[in-house]
Image (tube, coloured by chain):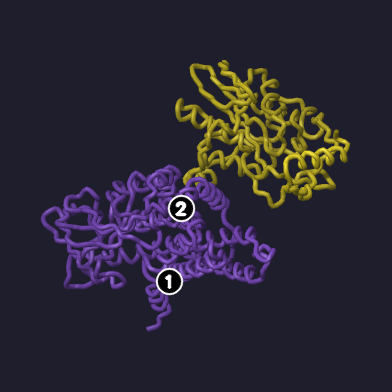
Chain colours: A yellow, B purple
Amino acid sequence: MKIVVCIKQVPDTTEVKLDPKTGTLIREGIPSIINPDDKAGIEAALRIKEETGANVTVLSMGPPQADAALREALAMGVDEAILLTDRAFGGADTWATSSTLAAALKKIPYDLVITGRQAIDGDTAQVGPQIAEHLGIPQVSYVSELHVKDGYVAARRDFEDRYHLIKVACPCLVTALAELNKPRYMSVGGIMDAYRDRQVTVWTLADIQDTVDPANLGLKGSPTKVKKSFTKAAKGSGEKFSVGADEAVTIIMEKLRGKNLI
Amino acid sequence: MDFQLSKEHEMLQKMYRDFTENEVKPFAEEVDEEEQFPVETVKKLARYGFLGIPFPKEYGGQGADHLAYAMAVEELSKACATTAVIVSAHTSLCASPIYMFGSEEQKQKYLPPLNRGEMLGAFGLTEPGAGTDAGGQQTMAVLVDDHYILNGTKFFITNAGYADVYIIIAMTDKSVGTRGCSAFIVEKDFPGFSVGKKEKKLGIKGSSTCELILEDCIVPKENLLGREGEGFKIAMRTLDGGRVGIAAQALGIGQGAVDETVKYVKERKQFNKRISQFQNTQFQLADMQTRVEASRLLVYRAACGEDCKQPFAHLAAMAKLYASETASDVTRRAVQLFGGYGYTREYPVERMMRDAKITEIYEGTSEVQRMVIAAWMKIN
């Protein structure tokens, strides 16, 4: 069995700050990590590898620095790592990102593609499902349990108030929730190998141009236009009242009326 | 001169930190309070390669270096000095002498299980009457046919009771003093080997420190490490490496105490101010961090010296001397900055203060380190 896990390198914070002038993310001084949902995807793939001897490849689109995320995956135990990096891919929205990743996937044999549900820096949850659409394969999103057997994947898809147990034929794509598992750490020897003996394969536009329409790549291929990005203004400290229930109701009513909310 | 960590060392540091934060820190208080050897943590350490860091892969090691090893001990010690010394004693005092002085057969037999953490290691040099005066060994080893018979008592043995393999120093020829010492690889199941009284200690309470009793202990001839008469040399070289580990432990304890204190002083308010706003707090912490950083430079320098096969005994001694005295000083000041809360077991700094003290004592007291340094300076 061949598994490809798509991962994204993200800033290690859920409190991403934006440059108020340009509206872009301020990444300086913030360490980068593998997106948590994606890391759960790596762990899920490694467990299937341990059970069935599957081969696991990680795939990422990003700037050259994303090499560190791929080395981390190698140090956790994946077999191969591919980095898609090219200026032509820069500025991609989810459509252009999924187009690029799908173009690469058309060149890699796979039975199962795992992506994270969503990235902590964008929270769109669109890339995984879009890849499945580009590839024309079935997809199960929001997966919190995953088993592989005889050419099928059995997955539990979580909703807010219910879950589905789904059996789906391979090849297919699942999007993993961080709750799927507790990812292993890198091992000391794995880290040494990742940097000294093993390679991250780098693919540029030239390597995938026959499987994708260049009009779907990068900033130019991104239909999403961001109108405005802003950082939430810090709230001032609230007013405190130590009063009884009746008086509290009166105060709240007055406040709400004052703001024309009721 | 390049003070930048390599990419692999940076990644190792990140992994060590994640592991320590999630797998070591949550249990540190309990390990101390219950005086409990952290058996489950040791299994996890084994899984991720912490028990074979500086040894080649062909012997089941992780193929990293002594800097990587020292950094692991440092990071673990920030949260739990007990956990760290288990790794240090196992690596520096057992696997390391087998790697340096063992025959190919001995390396093939013992290093893979030690490095994979299937076996735990320990070292027995100290005796009731032979501490700093390590040459005054009373334990005897007599060759009878194809085995040695060992008799004697070892004292203060770290990992005792949990270790499977012990490097034991004993006299094969008492008439020639330290040149009559030999080293042996002793398994816990050898006839005549037993673990005696467990010590009750001030700090590193979860670490197992026991007496070893050798009563007509039968050790196969092929378990002589190096040659007869090389035991003292092997022990001294082993301790040079061990001191880098203990220095790293002290460094970690010191940094851990600074980190805890920085967090605390930003929260604690007195006189309507965070105590971090007082200049005394700022100056104390600036001094503490500076000393810890100086320790780090010495520890990393000694570890790199060992990796480059340079003479490093004096560097290891300096690192241990400075880092251990710094750890004691910094943790004592940390408790002071915490005030009354620091004296309680609600916060970790009193534990760190108790744990720090041993780093000035074991694997050569601070006084021994000064002797080593003075000898290197040719002052006599």
Spot occupied by residue B242 in the image (x, y as percentages of width and height): 39, 62
Give the residue pinned by disc 2: B29
Determine whether B155 is above or below A254 in the image: below
Camera sees residue A252: yes
Question: Is residue B343 or residue B98 the one in the foreground?
Answer: B343
Determine whether B284 is above or below A109 in the image: below
Spot occupied by residue A203 in the image (x, y as percentages of width and height): 66, 35
> What type is the residue that disc 1 sits on?
His
Give the side of residue A82 with respect to residue B246, left or right.
right
Camera sees residue B91: no
Give the residue pinned by disc 1: B314
Determine whether A260 is above or below B147 in the image: above
Quadrant, the C terminus of chain B: bottom left
Question: Is residue B48 or residue B291 the one in the foreground?
Answer: B291
> What type is the residue that disc 2 sits on?
Glu
Identify the residue at the far bottom of this view. B380
Determine whether A41 is above or below B151 in the image: above
Q: Chain of mark 2?
A: B
Spot occupied by residue A151 in the image (x, y as percentages of width and height): 52, 17
Q: Residue at x 17, y 59 (%)?
A: B150
